[in-house]
Amino acid sequence: MARAQLEPRDDREIFVVPLEVRPGHIDDNGHVNNVVYVGWLQDAGTAHWNARFDAETRARWSWVALRHEIDYFRPLLPDAADVKARTWVGDPQGPRFNRYVRIEDGEGRLCAQGVSEWVLVDAATMRPQRIPPDMLPAFEAR
């Protein structure tokens, strides 16, 4: 079944995270293991959050991943260089955001894409909290 390719939204910031293919990422099939992609989805979201919010905000709020969905288009091999994750968020739904990630090789070709559902929680209580309206501009196109 063919999957539609995720395309970034014009109204959202597209945050780019460089990724490194390491020897330990390569599986018995000779390409990056599927589990590594899950880590990259989380790393991209965390990097975006850390880059846009100060230490005080990050101490007050945290994010918990509820699910990840990944589609694979082309393998990343051991010699892959200039690999990047491009990430952006969807529309808030109460305490939840969908986060979208495209993983591209050095030539800009889509290798994998993912959608993760994240829920905002109060860092002290770990209870879900509605995403505050004043948080949203940080994710808008710049």
Image (cartoon, rainbow, N blue to C red):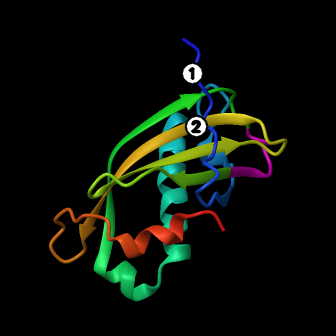
- Horizontally, residue 117 falls left or right of residue 6, namely left
* Span highlighted in magenta in the image: 78-84
Q: Going by the picture, which residue comes out furthest to the right?
A: 107
At a point 56% along the width and 74% down the height, the residue shown is 51
Label 2 element class: strand
Determine whether 89 is above or below 5 in the image: below
Front one among 26 and 120: 120
The image position of residue 40, as x and y in percent, is 54, 50
The image position of residue 68, as x and y in percent, is 40, 40
Determine whether 93 is above or below 6 in the image: below
At a point 56% along the width and 36% down the height, the residue shown is 33
Q: Which residue is mark 1?
A: 3
At a point 49% along the width and 59% down the height, the residue shown is 45
Residue type at the position of mark 1: Arg
The image position of residue 28, as x and y in percent, is 59, 28
- Horizontally, residue 39 falls left or right of residue 134, namely right
Q: Quadrant of the C terminus?
A: bottom right
Circles 1 and 2 in contact, beta carbons < 8 Å? yes
Determine whether 84 is above or below 108 in the image: below
At a point 61% along the width and 61% down the height, the residue shown is 13
Disc 2: CA contacts within 10 A as few (<14), some (14-19) or many (>=20): many
Q: Splitting the image into 4 quarters, where does residue 57 fall? A: bottom left
- Horizontally, residue 105 falls left or right of residue 127, namely right
Q: Which residue is mark 2?
A: 113
Residue type at the position of mark 2: Gln
Q: Quadrant of the N terminus?
A: top right
Which tag, 1 or 2, sits closer to the chain's start? 1
